[in-house]
Image (tube, coloured by chain):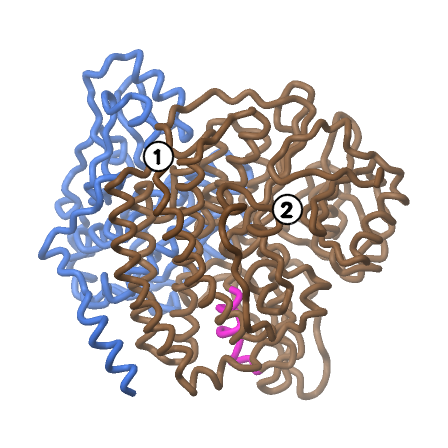
């Protein structure tokens, strides 16, 4: 008993005050990229050719955040002249097209569907479907339940049964072996329901794009309402997206 | 021994030097090696022009490789030694070669084979799910069956578990995976080289550094790249941080599974602190984008060194105190002790690796036996509790957390700085083989690359430690209460995606 109390005192209160207070991530963290659209074409081409995800659209001078895995190679190659990654973790969008970015994303709160805010603003229950990713998205979604983030203080919970859920949160590129289970889980959620694609895999196939064993794009089998980019998305990226889209 | 070629971890060899034995001799060589206590690191098939061949990488206290031309069907090695059982199933699934007399030849991941030959298991792959299979059943008046998954109740990966129970007691657990199969090996053999590191880092997200290192070391050997000491220090620290974060998360989850909540909350948060240390090192909580062929993308400067060292000094006593809370609680001990035991002889038969193996008394640690990066100069760990139960697996992790912390502190005290990273064009040596091994947090991770006469990757074989250890979990459940499944499962915490590839 004494040990329990001693540990309790040592641990103290650790829950973050986000979103009331901003959190500043360490400078090496790679968040929303800033793109220099007046960068010389030759350098842009060079970065686009080297990008392992083919996420750079050289002609439009934009980056597809739905494909990008935030490896930072374009920043290194261009020595920051073409791209620099900021520490801004707020990257969720309501439209796939908005993820083709030069560094500005539309404010998510303004683009959220109003009836979702009314229906789920005070209570949101989500069923998580893990569909053939690498388990990093799942791990960094799970941490939202730890005391630092404490997701349930916002009335948001991940629930065990799709029957109890208001929507699905999908990670992974949806393997052919998970296609049926994903569709069945979605069908088991009562309407109206929301669909969240989390991580590069669920948005575009991510690192596995082009594989014949995956679906690769959640939106091609179920219409997606909210996109959360990242590989994996930082827990704060997910938290920001959920709060702004639903609250 | 001319039937086996001695190789070293991460050193390229000319493929012409690899023995190509008649199958009967190949089989006998492998069986003799296993009989003498050796283990299988890799055993797989590959296609070279029109022929399909087999290759085996074996370990005792040294590494060996040998090969043969593959017959379309062959006398199963598993019929003699269990050490080959998963490998033979995989060979059947990937190349349609049938191991005759295999005691339980069933699919591994549920996909069409690469060679276009008839399916060994008689599966119809136009069906969507890997459930097309008659599960092993126990029959009897009091016997019932429990089916779980693929979609589970929490935020976890998909897999199917089939329990044969009598009341609460589990006779048998069958684990059918494959839901996470996304064609990793096929991709690694066919995509441009620039994509390779990204795919390696996502073979198993919680083992980003483990798999990333295996690949980087393999490509470095094939492309003849040198890695400086500073980069080696960063890589070693990154691998140990990955180990600590995962062990801490799992000890918290084990505590939660026996309904002791405070340590679960504390370790849930503290795990995040270690992930944030990885973020300080390389910008990602999972170590993404840090390890690349030739070095590391981020050097460790004085600032990062100080941040890491200060945070470790702050966290280490907290971790010790929470561990004392878990391991000092009689109600926790009562649930951990003698639960989910895998005996040493069984562990050896199925080739258990990592902390699961060490908890069953198999001391093997790739950091000691086949040291890469800085490990040759670092002290080894010794595990004191090796009874094979949940308590042993938990205790081994507790010991490893403190050991890894010690290693990081030793490395932080060194002052080498890595040269800054410049991406290089990779030209791989033709007609070569390289095998890399690293002790990832779960155990032995191994990558093997074969190149053709143009220096193109002809075969890329990946093995996650979970490939061995899922069988251990199934054995741990024999004769256990079904309500102890979450506890046993978490004490192994195996990778679905690392297995499914």
Q: Secondary structure at mark 1?
A: loop
Which disc is residue B417 wearing? 1
Which disc is residue B439 wearing? none
Q: Secondary structure at mark 2?
A: loop
> Residue B179 in the image: x percent, y percent?
54, 54
Q: Please, what is the dominant secondary structure of the magenta stretch? A: helix
Q: Relative to A20, is B418 on the left or the right?
A: right
Q: Relative to A111, is B485 on the left or the right?
A: right
**Would you place residue A45 above or below residue B135 in this image?**
above
> Residue B157 in the image: x percent, y percent?
47, 58
Residue drawn at (51%, 67%) of the image: B396
Residue drawn at (63%, 66%) of the image: B472
Q: Relative to B219, is A203 on the left or the right?
A: left
Residue drawn at (55%, 20%) of the image: B427
User: In which quadrant will I find the C terminus of chain A?
Assistant: bottom left
**C-beta proximity under 8 Å, tags 2 and 1:** no
Residues rendered magenta in the picture: B481-492
Check disc 2 and report the residue beneath it.
B111
Residue drawn at (57%, 75%) of the image: B389
Q: CA distance from mark 2 to mark 1?
A: 46 Å
* N-terminal-most mark, 2 or 1: 2
The answer to whether residue B236 of the structure is visible from this angle is: yes
Question: What chain is the brown one?
Answer: B
Q: From the image, state whether disc 2 or disc 1 is nearer to you.
A: 1
> Residue B458 in the image: x percent, y percent?
65, 29
Q: Give the colour of chain A.
A: blue
Do dots 2 and 1 share one subunit? yes
Q: Where, by quadrant of the figure, is residue A96 drawn?
A: top left
Residue B484 falls inside the magenta stretch: yes
Residue in the foreground of this view, choosing between B379 and B28: B379
């Amino acid at each position: 008993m004494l040990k329990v109390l001693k540990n309790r005192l040592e641990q103290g209160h650790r829950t973050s005050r986000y979103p009331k207070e901003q959190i500043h991530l360490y400078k090496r963290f790679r968040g929303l990229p800033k793109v220099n659209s007046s960068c010389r074409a030759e350098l842009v081409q060079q970065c686009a050719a080297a990008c392992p995800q083919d996420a750079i659209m050289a002609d439009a001078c934009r980056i597809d955040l739905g494909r990008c895995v935030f490896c930072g190679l374009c920043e290194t190659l261009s020595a920051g002249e073409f791209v620099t990654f900021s520490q801004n973790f707020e990257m969720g969008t309501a439209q796939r097209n908005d993820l083709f970015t030069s560094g500005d994303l539309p404010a998510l709160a303004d683009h959220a569907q109003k009836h979702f805010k009314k229906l789920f603003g005070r209570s949101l229950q989500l069923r998580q479907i893990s569909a053939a990713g690498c388990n990093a998205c799942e791990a960094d979604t799970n941490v939202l339940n730890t005391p630092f983030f404490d997701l349930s203080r916002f009335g948001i919970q991940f629930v065990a049964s799709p029957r109890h859920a208001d929507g699905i949160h999908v990670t992974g590129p949806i393997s052919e072996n998970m296609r049926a289970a994903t569709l069945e889980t979605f069908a088991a959620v009562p309407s109206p329901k929301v669909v969240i694609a989390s991580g590069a895999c669920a948005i575009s196939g991510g690192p596995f794009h082009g594989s014949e064993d995956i679906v690769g794009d959640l939106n091609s089998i179920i219409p997606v309402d909210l996109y959360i980019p990242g590989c994996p998305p930082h827990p704060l990226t997910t938290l920001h997206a959920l709060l702004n889209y639903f609250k | 021994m001319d039937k086996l070629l001695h190789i070293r971890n991460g050193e390229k060899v000319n493929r012409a030097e690899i023995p190509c034995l008649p199958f009967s001799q190949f089989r006998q060589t492998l069986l003799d090696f296993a009989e003498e206590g050796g283990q299988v690191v890799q055993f797989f098939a590959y296609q070279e022009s029109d022929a399909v061949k087999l290759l085996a990488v074996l370990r005792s206290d040294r590494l060996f490789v040998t090969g043969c031309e593959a017959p379309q069907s062959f006398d199963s090695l598993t019929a003699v030694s269990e050490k080959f059982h998963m490998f033979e199933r995989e060979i059947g699934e990937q190349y349609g070669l049938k191991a005759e007399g295999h005691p339980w030849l069933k699919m591994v991941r549920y996909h069409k084979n690469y060679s276009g030959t008839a399916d060994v298991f008689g599966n119809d792959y136009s069906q969507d799910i890997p459930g097309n299979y008659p599960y092993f059943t126990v029959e009897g008046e009091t016997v019932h069956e429990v089916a779980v998954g693929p979609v589970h109740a929490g935020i976890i990966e998909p897999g199917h578990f089939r329990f044969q129970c009598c009341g609460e007691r589990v006779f048998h657990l069958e684990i059918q995976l494959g839901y996470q199969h996304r064609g990793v090996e096929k991709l690694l053999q066919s995509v441009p080289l620039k994509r390779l590191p990204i795919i390696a880092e996502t073979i198993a997200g919680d083992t980003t550094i483990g798999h990333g290192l295996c690949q980087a070391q393999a490509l470095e050997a094939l492309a003849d790249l040198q890695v400086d000491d500073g980069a080696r220090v960063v890589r070693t620290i990154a691998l140990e941080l990955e180990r600590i974060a995962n062990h801490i998360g799992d000890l918290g989850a084990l505590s939660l599974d026996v309904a002791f909540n405070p340590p679960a909350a504390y370790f849930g948060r503290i795990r995040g602190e270690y992930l944030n240390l990885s973020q300080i090192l390389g910008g990602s909580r999972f170590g993404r984008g840090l390890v690349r062929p030739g070095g590391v993308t981020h050097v460790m400067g004085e600032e990062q060194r100080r941040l890491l060292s200060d945070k470790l000094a702050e966290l280490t006593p907290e971790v010790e105190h929470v561990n004392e809370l878990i391991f000092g609680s009689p109600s926790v001990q009562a649930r951990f002790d003698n639960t989910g035991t895998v005996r040493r002889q069984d562990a050896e038969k199925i080739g258990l690796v990592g902390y699961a193996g060490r908890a069953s008394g198999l001391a093997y640690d790739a950091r000691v036996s086949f040291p890469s990066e800085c490990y040759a100069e670092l002290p080894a760990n010794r595990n004191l509790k090796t009874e094979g139960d949940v308590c042993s697996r938990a205790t081994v992790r507790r010991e490893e957390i403190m050991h890894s912390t010690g290693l990081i502190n030793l490395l932080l005290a060194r002052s080498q700085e890595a040269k800054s990273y410049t991406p290089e064009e990779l030209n791989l040596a033709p007609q070569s083989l390289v095998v890399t091994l690293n002790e990832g947090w779960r155990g032995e991770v191994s990558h093997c690359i074969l190149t053709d006469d143009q220096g193109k990757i002809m075969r890329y074989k990946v093995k996650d430690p979970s490939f061995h250890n899922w069988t251990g979990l199934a054995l741990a459940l024999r004769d256990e209460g079904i309500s102890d499944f979450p506890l046993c499962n978490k004490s192994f915490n195996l990778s679905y995606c690392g297995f499914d590839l």
